Amino acid sequence: QVQLVESGGGVVQPGKSLRLSCAASGFIFSGYTMHWVRQAPGKGLAWVALISHDGNTLYYGDSVKGRVTISRDNFDNTVNLQINSLRTEDTAVYYCARELEGSLYMDVWGKGTTVTVSS
Amino acid sequence: SYVLTQPPSVSVAPGKTARITCGGNNIGIKSVHWYQQRPGQAPVLVIFYNTDRPSGIPERFSGSNSGNTATLTISGVAAGDEADYYCQVWDSGSHHRVFGGGTKLTVL
């Protein structure tokens, strides 16, 4: 069945880097834009980044721009999020979600991976 | 960037109708999507393109969008509908996806 499974979260010190991964299965991965969305404890959803189906178009949210890189591998069916210079305010559950190219909504979400930035 | 405004909370008695609003400048010309997030779970799409329901979402969930307000309507509310609800649009200027702040639906 259609599935997105995030991994790579953990406890990290401020200033360090982390790479999150999302493994996709059950659908034609190369036909979908992929997103990362995060949710700080007790807060709402915040869009982080997107990568187009072919990897040629990237957009980043204002709160992470310059510290985050999104990438994908259409052979391994994975999408990654590299976060550098981690701050305490990056503490959140990070979800990956798919969007049929051009549809502008996210129809399938993973269960999320938790990132805690703390010294 | 584009801003979406939702009420922090809405309360409704079981069996009644809940209406959750999402305000934005001229939002009526945009496509609005709605997500339900139950406690401890990932978001689930419940309405897309203002009024369409994904397969598996009950007909009790409906949406509308006009002027400066989009609305998610849940009729015959049940305890299982208690969740946070988020609206989302595409900001054509930045190409970013934008979420509203979320509304906590409480079933009394």
Image (cartoon, coloured by chain):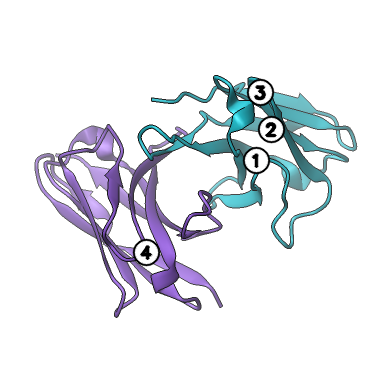
Chain colours: A purple, B cyan
Q: Secondary structure at mark 1?
A: strand
Q: Amino acid at mark 4?
A: His
In this rendering, is residue B65 above or below B53? above
User: At 46% across and 76% down in the image, what residue appears?
Assistant: A28
Give the mark nearer the N terminus: 2 vs 3: 3
Q: Nearer the viewer, mark 1 or mark 3?
A: 3
Q: CA distance from mark 2 to mark 1?
A: 5 Å
Location of residue A11 in the rendering, given as x and y in whole percent from the top left corner: 22, 50
Q: Secondary structure at mark 2?
A: strand
User: At 83% across and 40% down in the image, what residue appears?
Assistant: B77
Left or right of B70 on screen, residue A41: left
Q: Are marks 1 and 4 on the same chain?
A: no
Q: Amino acid at mark 2?
A: Leu
Location of residue B6 in the rendering, given as x and y in whole percent from the top left corner: 59, 24
Q: Mark 2 highlights which residue?
A: B105
- The reply to whether callout 1 and callout 3 are in contact (CB within 8 Å) is no
Instruction: Specify the label residue B83 is tagged with.
Output: 1
Q: Mark 3 highlights which residue?
A: B69
Q: Amino acid at mark 1?
A: Ala
Instruction: Specify the label residue A53 is tagged with.
Output: 4
Q: CA distance from mark 3 to mark 4?
A: 32 Å
